[in-house]
Amino acid sequence: MLVEAANRLNVQVSILDQGDSGPAKQLAAHDQHIQGNFQDAEKIRELAQRVDILTVEIEHVNVAELIRLKQENPKLQIHPSPRAIKIIQDKFEQKRHLNAHGVPLPAFQEVKNEDELKEAGKQFGYPLMLKAKRLAYDGRGNAAVHSEADIPQAWRSLQPEGSQQALYVEQWVPFAKEIAVMVARGRDGSVRSYPVVETVQRNNICHLVLAPAQIDGTVAARAKKIAETAIISLEGAGIYGVEMFVLEDGGLLLNEIAPRPHNSGHYTIEACETSQFENHLRAIMGRPLGSPALKVGAAAMVNILGDADDVETMKPCVAALSVDGATIHAYGKGDCRPGRKMGHITVVGQSMTQVHNRLRSILKAASPTEA
Ligand code: ATP
Ligand code: MG
Ligand code: MG
């Protein structure tokens, strides 16, 4: 989707990625791509030699190499800054950083062993959320701990025998809703944020996004303020996704930040005056940021997750063909594995009521048992 936006702007994107025909490489037809791992220092170096600006669309990259490259050549543009990526990569460091900048967070604490987790349980109460500091996505680094008796199993699930994976613990947040705010920041420091959206996760994976979030306007305004404060505390240009919890009383706690285009911002392609992808490009290139305003009354996005086979997986897309206001994005990833994000559908409408009506057949096709 970043390459789609880049193509329209006549910006050439060279991609470092494991495959030779991934979706991004399919869309950018030239011989300047690199095949390799984004942890591989040599490959990152090779890419840096070929481009004017380096950016990431996943935070789990070899950030030490990015820091070295920047030290060797301070003029090389890397966005967001390697320092920001380094902080965000480690969820515990991220929380310490945000806490120091006055951002509201659930209580959290480092835990080096099961005894320390037991102590945290006495302090925070149960349930608790045990989390891996690094390499987390789609909830894979999380384990809910419901009581002291749960500790050994939860610990082993995140730190199996021989693993060096560092963990920390968070107070359980009994949220009423989850929301997200995309914030774009230009090279000149200017900031523009998108409407607050509501995200619905299923099995820890984003299932549905509703824009705008159906929450009180004052809560939405506070959410934007918190998101912008958090992003301003980090260095470097680009688009950032800020995930937050809304409590029953309207209180807000930040969950985590993604230093890149975010699943909760995919709807912006059809629903906003400038998509998150175009604004990321504008931001890192030092161009003026585009308007993030909604240009439709309301929008929703449904993720297409891999099912038993291609036919099952694509059923929501088939349903979407008969829905006014629906746009299908099938990514062309090839291998369809259960739970893998294979695409998404955006539905726009004049009002949230209309969007909900339009969504019905698509959601039913996505999870027939629940509908
Ligand atoms: P992502 O794919 O968004 O990067 P992740 O693996 O980094 O996910 P988190 O965002 O930390 O995981 O958590 C995934 C989901 O688990 C959240 O969206 C939320 O639904 C739930 N969750 C996380 N932390 C807590 C908490 N402290 N209390 C209650 N629920 C939580
Ligand atoms: Mg995450
Ligand atoms: Mg998350």
Image: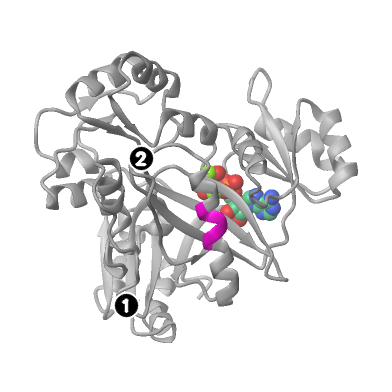
Q: Position of residue 158 (x, y in %)?
A: 66, 33
Q: Residue at x 88, y 36 (%)?
A: 119
State which tag comes first along the sequence, 2 or 1.
2
Which residue is farthest right? 122
Q: Residue at x 48, y 61 (%)?
A: 207
Q: Residues within 10 Å of mark 2 (few under 14, many from 20)?
A: few
Mark 2 secondary-structure assignment: loop
Q: Position of residue 360 (x, y in %)?
A: 42, 79
| Residue 355 picture quarter | bottom left
Magenta span: chief secondary structure: helix
Q: Residue at x 80, y 49 (%)?
A: 146
Q: Do we see residue 215 in this rendering?
A: no
Which range is magenta? 224-228
Q: Residues within 10 Å of mark 1 (few under 14, many from 20)?
A: some
Give the number of the disc on residue 57: 2
Mark 1 secondary-structure assignment: loop
Q: Position of residue 291 (x, y in %)?
A: 30, 64
Indicate whether residue 170 is drawn in magenta. no
Distance from mark 2 CB to nearest ligand 1 atom below 8 Å: no
Q: Is residue 238 above or below residue 32?
A: below
Q: Position of residue 322 (x, y in %)?
A: 25, 79
Q: Do we see residue 252 in this rendering?
A: yes
Instruction: Name the foreground residue: 192 vs 332.
Output: 192
Q: Amino acid at mark 1?
A: Val
> Which residue is the site of mark 1?
296
